[in-house]
Amino acid sequence: MTTKSAAAAARATVYGYPRQGRNRELKKAVEGYWKGRVTAEALRATAAELRRTNWLQLADAGINEVPTGDFSYYDHVLDTTVMVGAIPERHRAAVAGDALDGYFAMARGTQEVAPLEMTKWFDTNYHYLVPELGPDSAFTADSAKQVGELKEALALGLTARPVLVGPVTYLLLAKPAPGMPADFEPLTLLDRLLPVYAEVLADLRAAGAEWVQLDEPALVQDRTPAELNAAERAYRDLGGLADRPKLLVASYFDRLGEALPMLAKAPVDGLALDFTGAAAANLDALASAGGLPGKRLVAGVVNGRNVWVNDLAASLSTLGTLLGLADRVDVSASCSLLHVPLDTAAERDIEPQVLRWLAFARQKSAEVVTLARGLARGTDAIAADLAANRADLASRADSPVTHDPAVRARASAVAETDGRRSPSYAERAAAQRAHLGLPLLPTTTIGSFPQTGDLRAARADLRAGRIDTADYEERIKAEIQEVISFQEKTGIDVLVHGEPERNDMVQYFAERLTGYLATQHGWVQSYGTRYVRPPILAGDISRPEPMTVRWTSYAQSLTEKPVKGMLTGPVTMLAWSFVRDDQPLADTAHQVALALRDEVHDLEAAGTSVIQVDEPALRETLPLRSADRAGYLDWATEAFRLTTSGVRPDTQIHTHMCYAEFGDIVQAIDDLDADVISLEAARSRMQVAHELAAHGYPREAGPGVWDIHSPRVPSTDEAAELLRTGLKAIPAERLWVNPDCGLKTRAWPETRASLEHLVTAARTIRDEL
Ligand code: GLN
Ligand code: ZN
């Protein structure tokens, strides 16, 4: 095929679309079903209507081939578990009783059985349910959902392509089922799984699928030769099937690396590749691999994970290069549009000019269509779109929102030493000991106290104008009084104000920093029926006035004990937002750090001796490819240090992270140079304490002794036992006593009891020393 005909055939497609509906109808229907207010039939009807609306919206926009099977009541990895019949033993009875209830039992658990574990989908904020497999796992094909949804789309007269999680990624995302050997590798089940995929593919073909997409994002991570071999075998097998649709193997979120030449040679009919961000390296790799002669290439040139308008001219140039490399080049977003909100048109509070810089799922689909048209018919065919796009990009580049000279001047004046604390840690520790006068094994909490329905109602009342700011603030003060008096009575050593004024640890700060935008309807699925509305970091960041000092000072005025100031760190402020793509993340983090540094300074000036800067997201934004990690950790730790280094030696800087696996970033944690770190540790029985010790971590640490993810109250003995385990790794002079994380999701009764037990346990152990 010549380049010219490859261009003329260019078509527009996407891999997936937001599931929730314009008004989060899916959330309402699913939650209604759980509460018994919506029947299964009504839920199914709502779901079918949402799918239909999405397909028609895509088709109206000019998408030539719509995805099917990407819809889910809860999670597409769980749907895959059902499709391959990998129902865990403990859920079989429920699934046999009623498929829908069994499905939700796997997702959420029931009184009797625990749900599947949930974890983040690659480096996104979407969570999937982790498949549980063991050496004896058997698979059986259940193609009903995939076939049914394909038929729905075909019945609308559309060209449709089913999208499935690929077999290699499915196994690589799985973990050993409870009770199975921890070193069991699910990928060893590949030969058992492939026949099931073959059956599903045959069913889809029989139902009218010309193409089927198999998503293999796991291949963009570092993979062992054995894993790559398994992938090669998988696609040799599936490609060799007689009765099969055409296969499109998709990858996204990063570059394919070693897997690219392998897949290029595999007997499949097409590859879908990401060409945005770090995945742009796919372009050169594809050329070096000799392109995809005889195959279809779907080019993900519209970023499916951010909210920014595409640079159409730049994308067209990438597409132009790709034309020489494949038989047929189609255009898509880089990944499913599940990761972005639905439609910018729903936003009324964002300035119209700024709104034009944004593209949500609906706008991104239109960009894909425009690019496919430009590729097929030449730039003249999209001249008006290109001109409008150029104007939008220029307005963004020139805007005072994105370019605040004062912020830029300050950022470039930062000296290397501004990000270094002095004196050394040892000297600081001595100064802090003298200044704070804390006992051995000091007790503290991570920041938030229960966010009661009352508090949320007060915030809703304020927003609706039912109460005024003064009323609201009285309400917050009353809460702080209660939190302080409880902590004093219980005998906690370093107190917190409880964060009652914060709706969310990122949003609260985003609302107070210049440069962030808030959306009204920018919902994105986090997991199941939980949707979040991430703030948009659009411009240069500055802090017009102190954000937290007032509440911390008020709390401090109520007690003689030290009250810890609480801030969200720069890396987390980026990780849980949509971040501008017009400058390096390092530069954006640097600006956020400077704004937070001012807050740290003001807290100290107001008499705060202990300041905690939370970085729970440090580990999760770690790049997927290890080659990119050092660069990331460099700027991430630098931003943290810039936030915290302006303080006196006797001001104690804390940080907090909540995840159990962090062996690969111990050095980075050390590089933060925080005086105290609190970590999640209760479930892993203090494993992190041992990892810190093995690294030679020299600072103070509080491995959590209360698992706050469950309403269970730990006994005094249990907490004491965990402390004894902790003491084997961390000496008493450096060990803190605290829960795993904040208490905002807990209720008061279990909070009271658990913290009392923690304090008693600390006292018991102090007596033993
Ligand atoms: N300070 C926050 C809180 O206590 C920390 C939350 C988090 O780590 N996710 O809620
Ligand atoms: Zn936490």
Image (cartoon, grey):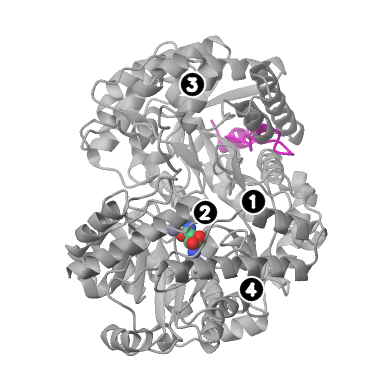
Label 4: few (<14), some (14–19) or many (≥20) C-alpha neighbours in 10 Å:
many
Pointers 4 and 2 in contact (C-beta within 8 Å): no
Q: Nearer the viewer, mark 4 or mark 2?
A: 2
Cα distance, mark 4 to mark 3? Answer: 48 Å
Mark with earlier residue (2, 1): 1
Pointers 3 and 1 in contact (C-beta within 8 Å): no
In the displayed structure, 588 sits above or below 147; it is: below
Q: Amino acid at mark 2?
A: Trp
Please give the name of the residue rendered at 53% of the width and 80% of the height, measured from the top-left corner. Answer: 556
Q: Which residue is mark 1?
A: 453
Mark with earlier residue (4, 3): 3
Residue 30: give x, y in percent of width and height: 63, 30
Task: Give the magenta range.
Answer: 1-26
Label 3: few (<14), some (14–19) or many (≥20) C-alpha neighbours in 10 Å:
many
Mark with earlier residue (4, 2): 4
Q: Amino acid at mark 1?
A: Gly
- Secondary structure under tag 1 reads helix
- Secondary structure under tag 2 reads helix
Q: Which residue is mark 3?
A: 102
Q: Amino acid at mark 3?
A: Gly
Residue 631: give x, y in percent of width and height: 38, 66
Cα distance, mark 2 to mark 3? Answer: 32 Å
Cα distance, mark 3 to mark 1? Answer: 30 Å
Q: Which residue is mark 4?
A: 540
In the displayed structure, 357 sits above or below 406; it is: above
Pointers 2 and 3 in contact (C-beta within 8 Å): no
